[in-house]
Image (tube, rainbow, N blue to C red):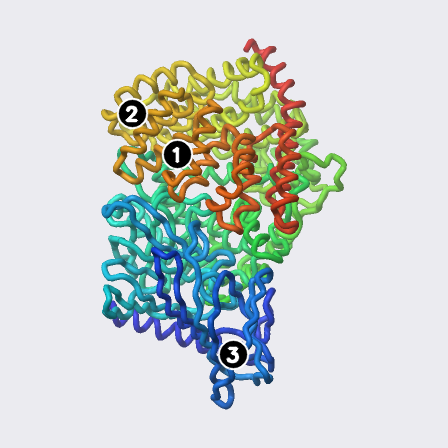
Amino acid sequence: MRTLLGMMVLAAWMLVATAYASTTNTSPVAVTTQLPTDVRPTHYDLTITPHAQAMRFDGHAVIALDVLHPTTSITLNALDLDLKQAVLSGGPDRTHFDPPRITLDKKAQTATFAFPASLPMGHYQLSIDYAGVINTQAFGLFAVNYQGKQGSQRALYTQFENADARRFFPCWDEPAYKATFALTVTVPKGEMAVSNMPVAAQDDVGSDLQRVRFAATPPMSTYLLFFGLGDFERISTRVDGTDIGLVAPRGSAAQGQFALASARAILPEYNTYFGLRYPLPKLDIVLAPGSSSSTAAMENWGAILSFEDYMLLDPTISSETNKSTVFNTLAHEMAHLWFGDLVTMRWWDNLWLNEGFANWMALRATSKLHPEWEQDVYNVWFSEGVMEIDAQKTTHPIIEPVTSPEQGQQAFDSITYAKGEALIVMLEHYIGEDAWRRGLQRYIAQHAYGNTVFDDLWQAMAGVTDQPIAAIAHDFTTQAGVPLLRVSDAKCQGGQTTVQVSQGEFSVDQPDKAPGHWRVPVIAQVIGQPPVRQVVVGNTTLQLPGCGALLVNAGQSGYYHSLYAPPLLAAINANFQKLSRMDQMGELDNAWALSMAGMQPVSEPFELIKAASPASNPMFWWDVTRHLYSFDANFRDDATARARYRRFATARLEAVFAQVGWLPKPGELASYKVLRTQLIVALGTLGDARIIAEARQRFLDLPSISSGDLRQNVLYVIARQADADTWNRLLAMARSEKAPLVRQKLYQMLALPEDEGLATRALNLALTPEIGNNGGEMFTGVSFLHPELAFDFAVAHRAQVDAMVGPNDRAEFYPDLAWGSNDAKIIERIQAFAAAHIAPDARSSADLVINMIGHRAEVRNKQVPQIDAWLKQNGW
């Protein structure tokens, strides 16, 4: 039955591929491309022989292609490949041609095959012998060295998004050039080879080698091809006719049982939601050792790549937060099996059609399948966080031009992921879940195995709602910025409230900017009454049933800030405890953003925190905790003011922690486990003496702690407050630890100390082979408390740090180390680095970091003294 099903699926794919090839021969798809459009590939037959110890590989590619217009040359992508020879055959006369002249353009990352005479329209085969290199970081074909059952071992994996398939084989490495792929590899016996599709044949070829041939894939983009090789083991399950496997280095797979069970739960949910079943016969989750500074996971069709640190759970060190992260990460990557793999954006300017939708779908699935984690509130957190970025002058629209691989890599940012997700949440809530789902099902069905642009989605939605959804989406995707709704003049008469709303723009660094214009879908309500849905354009009057305190962003699904007239704000605050946890979080975040931008008194969020009941929803306190914890850095240059701030912050959080405690209570909500970790980390960082003393006491008897949550919390506080002796003990623990996942987390702890000297030791350690492939993660860890140190150290050791980070990631990695700084003096150093080492069209990350640092410096200079004054007035 399984074999029959696989044959039926493959036959269906080949029909799709044939139809795809025949239509493109006469009617080429208009694409945004950096390649000539006169040739299109339809199928790749790839034969690869990796030489892992020599860090190189040999390849042979036979590419079936269609010449759509007569041409004397064929240009495709190739980078860091040695193209040895090429042969073209086929065409209308089925002839062989003289070997072409091959020209490489490293800057354009292309190879051109020139012929002495014009090639007529028709079907051809281009055969290429070549060789390539195996990289040490996650791009192209890369190696990971690790300590396994056999001592020091090496495994191989591929990572191609967004433009690194060209490092593995010569190809049309752009998402609109979909084709089918048949991969054959010659590998050592005893090692497991993994790709997108199941193994179709396996032969002994002598010399301890075997040839493994995988079944052909469906039509897909080049960046989704995958190959992995190593001393692996596989555990599996089966659901809805799909073989789901988890592939990990031998000895580790058992710790992936939760990930495997999660995938088993998610797949049927998605099959039902999308109305189109996952079409491949198998889905593997392939785990590389350790972690990566550039990626957590990659949605290769049929072979999702991730890392042990993000997907495995060890009961001695893993927490409830780790479990929810595993589930959410898998839910995101599996959403891509439809959004990205089956239906793919035509070009990287519409990346949000992949990532925004995967973010939204993942949170939806996590909230439905694990409601105990209460992760639906994260929609509020993500939206608030990206609005801070989108309110800067360095922001950009969701859809923006992409002209280079480096620029394409920088499209993987908060605007694409979080603002894209926020837009989807807003539209779904506005038109209703059922209508939204019907529209998505039409979109997926209409464009399966194809590529899409912005308008394709809204055309699919047109038949399910009479709301101006395309116009709203156009406003929010093609212009940057955050709407600001000013709410005033509410009057109640005859049991109905009339309120005036005017639209402007929320900007933190351009007070004189002419505001943008949006059609803003609003869900407003008088608290406790039915909501009203209406699009706000310019000055708008809302009619709401009932009288009393009102919200214009009820449910917090809207992507905008709300500035209430003082009497309306006072009414909300007076009724704060009556709000849902979503509205409590949203109104706190709204107050925080407006006060930090100087649009309302800084006392507003602090008054809410001061008045909040310790018995409020745990996720509300999770939100309060993150605000108080992160804002502490603004007081670092004034010891007296910082002590005052910390007294206030710890008093509020201690009152909550008194109810939560170090250990779980029988029957407590899972969200309390998440809150407990957040409180312990925050109180430890804020210098709470009781938390630190308790952590030190428990650390003395660490082996007796059986709870992964508790052990991780203790280690975090100890690492944050470490002195030299404690740091050395943590280092010794990491070096002697046999369990790979525990060892990895102990090394990560070494990057957390407040002590700058110990943080510097961690950075030096990150440069050594001892850390393996995870040095970049160590730099990121240090940057949380020491952004200036991490950035300056990385720049001073650039040659070594470059070896830790993929070439397309460096333009983002270095500036991001300084992200958390509020010291304007570092801005010149970032600018100098960008001018010297980052291409002009790839400086968006550097520009954003510079602007964020400047904004935080302004907050520190203007808002922090006002907060300190409020603290004094309130007796702190």
Q: Nearer the viewer, mark 3 or mark 2?
A: 3
Q: Are marks 1 and 2 in contact (CB under 8 Å)?
A: no
Amino acid type at circle 1 is Gln
**Dot in front, 1 or 2:** 1
Q: Quadrant of the N terminus?
A: bottom left
Outermost residue on the bottom side: it is 93
Q: Nearer the viewer, residue 571 or 512?
A: 512
Numbered label attached to residue 748 = 1
Q: Residue furthest front?
A: 54
**Secondary structure under the numbered disc 1 in the rendered image:** helix
- Spatial CA distance of label 3 from label 2 is 66 Å
Residue drawn 65% across and 46% down? 480
Occupied quadrant, residue 325: top left
Which residue carries the number 3 mark? 66
- In the figure, 818 relative to 457: above or below? above
The local secondary structure at tag 2 comes to loop
Please provide percent x and percent y for residue 524: 58, 39
Residue under the point 38% across and 41% down: 769
Pointer 2 residue: 665
